[in-house]
């Protein structure tokens, strides 16, 4: 069964499409949500968040495109989990998560947000491998330094160095582009 | 200004980093939660979920083989008898015999021949007996076999636009008489969409995706035996005895029911409810009643003329927002001989006679 088949079903409002979507992507979406929420709530509550991600896919099926279903689900899962964490007054335990950037507050208008998102994407894509993977594992998927070191067979100090380098590069480019 | 790196990445869609899947979450519970949420929303949003496929075109493209009809009735007799202490009455056996539709279609894909052997349906609840045969001779040794990725297209009788139903399907345990051969029996149970029966004479299609093998412990450890596409098409003829109905109410009656507080499984209080329709079928019953907050009507019991009581179990429910009524469908574990029904009893003692 392909993503195209799943999307056809979803867009027709056919529950079989949702069932197939879950069968394919539940492990991934669960991993994204759990990485972010594991220190803040029991598994049962995180299951509710995962369920909400698939409900979003059901309701916003028109936004899904073949080839980017997994990425879409990952982004929605991450944002829903982060929002839940924020509502609980908690923060992600990340390495030096704050960047000092010149300029005004975060953009409020859609056009500005889209512009900033495009520049962030370009900046992240400009990171060399494996620095980019280390950077995304930590700041996007909320994996700990120890987990990343283990998964990628690196020293923890090497992971921290790559994270520092990634932050520096991001700050440099965003500053240059005037974000 | 200060910005969080993790917030800057909010609009990113990452495609090239594969992360490890080790979350200790119950995938089964997530699926159940999600499906229950969409069922509720389906009712709320009044979406129409009916589908009609041009089945002939789909089937033509596949290697579909019809085989000679065998007598599959015995298997279903054993199955239904097992739900009732290994006993079916003569009347039940007669209904079953007249209802069983022998299909005998086989489709081969990915090293497995799947055969849709026979179907028993009352137009709302349907049982499909299938077998999977491993062509390499591999022994299918009595573990639990089923398919993930089921698509069932059932043409429905026309209904008003505001009525909504969701069809669900699940696999039941099918007894394997020979655990040393390369054949595994399977039983698919489809709960109708609660809004309308199937259209007699129309073509049903069943598409199966992944053949799974389970050791019966947890779904996460189930193994995919083959990932292919097995498509079947069949018709329930209008004269099939299983499609009979018995309409029991000509005017509303008042029954007793329970109300439940949100997220509670314990009844809160007993209230009176106006029931506006009740239809009996050979495998299910559907009643309609006026909506009330937290209201749930418990399953009915059918009593036959010889005094046999047949208890139903709850299957599906949906709400009609235009008329503020609720439709409940109940399922029976064994076939109901409609011509032998004396009355239907609701919890609280209200009886509705079949001859009124």
Image (cartoon, helix red, strand yellow):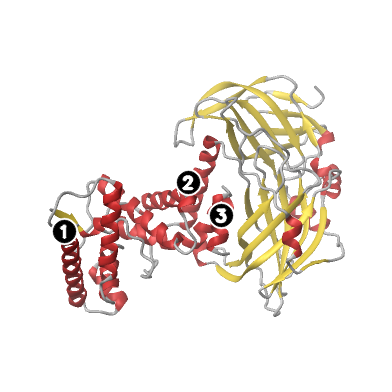
**Residue B131 picture location, percent across and down:** 73, 65
- The image quarter in which residue A118 lies: bottom left
The chain carrying label 1 is A
Q: Name the residue under label 1.
A: A98
- The image quarter in which residue A94 lies: bottom left
| Vertical side of B266 occupied by A174: above or below | below
| Vertical side of B252 occupied by A113: above or below | below
**Residue A2 picture location, percent across and down:** 56, 64
| Vertical side of B124 occupied by B176: above or below | below
Left or right: B35, with A119 as reference point: right
Q: Do labels 1 and 3 share a chain?
A: yes
Q: In which quarter of the image is the C terminus of chain B?
A: top right
Q: Which residue is drawn at 83% across and 34% down?
A: B340
In depth, the one of B45 and B168 nearer the eye is B45
The chain carrying label 2 is A
Decide: few, some or many residues near mark 2? Use Cα within 10 Å; few <14, some 14-19, many ≥20: some
Q: Which residue is drawn at 63% across and 46% down?
A: B167
Q: Name the residue under label 3.
A: A17
Decide: few, some or many residues near mark 3? Use Cα within 10 Å; few <14, some 14-19, many ≥20: many
Q: Name the residue under label 2.
A: A59
- Separation of disc 1 and disc 3 at Cα? 40 Å
Q: Is residue B24 visible?
A: no
Decide: few, some or many residues near mark 1? Use Cα within 10 Å; few <14, some 14-19, many ≥20: some
């Amino acid at each position: 069964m392909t993503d195209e088949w799943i999307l056809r079903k979803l867009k027709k409002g056919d529950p079989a499409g949702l069932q197939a979507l879950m069968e394919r992507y539940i492990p991934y979406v669960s991993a994204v949500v759990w990485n972010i929420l594991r220190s803040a709530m029991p598994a049962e509550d995180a299951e509710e968040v995962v369920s909400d991600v698939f409900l979003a896919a059901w309701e916003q099926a028109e936004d899904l495109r073949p080839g980017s279903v997994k990425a879409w689900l990952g982004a929605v899962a991450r944002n829903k989990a982060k929002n839940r964490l924020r509502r609980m007054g908690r923060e992600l335990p990340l390495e030096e998560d704050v960047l000092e950037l010149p300029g005004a507050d975060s953009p409020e208008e859609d056009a500005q947000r889209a512009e900033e998102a495009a520049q962030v994407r370009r900046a992240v894509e400009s990171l060399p491998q494996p620095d980019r993977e280390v950077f995304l594992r930590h700041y996007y998927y909320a994996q700990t330094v120890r987990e990343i070191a283990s998964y990628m067979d690196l020293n923890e100090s090497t992971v921290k160095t790559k994270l520092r380098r990634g932050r520096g590069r991001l700050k440099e480019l965003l500053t240059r582009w005037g974000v | 200004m200060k910005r969080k790196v993790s917030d800057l990445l909010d609009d990113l869609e990452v495609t090239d980093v594969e992360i490890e899947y080790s979350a200790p979450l119950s995938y089964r519970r997530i699926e159940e939660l999600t499906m229950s949420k969409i069922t509720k929303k389906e009712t709320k949003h009044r979406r129409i979920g009916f589908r009609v496929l041009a089945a002939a075109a789909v089937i033509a493209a596949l290697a579909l083989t019809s085989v000679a009809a065998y007598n599959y009735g015995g298997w279903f007799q054993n199955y239904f008898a097992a739900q009732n202490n290994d006993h079916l009455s003569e009347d039940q056996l007669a209904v079953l015999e007249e209802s069983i539709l022998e299909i005998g279609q086989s489709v081969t894909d990915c090293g497995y021949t799947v055969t849709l052997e026979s179907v028993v349906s009352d137009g709302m609840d349907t049982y499909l007996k299938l077998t999977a045969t491993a062509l390499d001779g591999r022994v299918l040794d009595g573990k639990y076999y089923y398919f993930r990725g089921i698509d069932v297209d059932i043409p429905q009788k026309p209904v008003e636009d505001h009525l909504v139903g969701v069809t669900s399907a699940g696999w039941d345990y099918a007894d394997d008489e020979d655990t040393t051969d390369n054949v595994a029996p399977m039983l698919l149970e489809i709960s109708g969409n609660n809004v309308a029966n199937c259209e007699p004479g129309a073509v049903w299609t069943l598409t199966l995706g992944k053949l799974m093998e389970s050791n019966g412990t947890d779904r996460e450890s189930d193994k995919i035996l083959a990932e292919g596409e097995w498509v079947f098409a069949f018709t329930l003829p209008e004269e099939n005895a299983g499609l009979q109905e018995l309409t029991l109410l000509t005017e509303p009656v008042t029954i007793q029911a329970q109300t439940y507080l949100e997220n509670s499984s314990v009844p809160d209080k007993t209230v009176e409810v106006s029931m506006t329709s009740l239809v009996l079928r050979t495998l299910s019953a559907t009643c309609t009643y006026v909506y009330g907050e937290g209201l749930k009507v418990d399953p009915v019991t059918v009593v036959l003329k010889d005094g046999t009581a047949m208890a139903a179990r709850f299957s599906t429910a949906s709400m009609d927002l235009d008329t503020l009524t609720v439709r409940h469908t109940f399922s029976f574990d064994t076939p109901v001989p409609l011509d032998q029904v004396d009355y239907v009893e609701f919890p609280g003692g209200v009886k509705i006679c079949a001859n009124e």
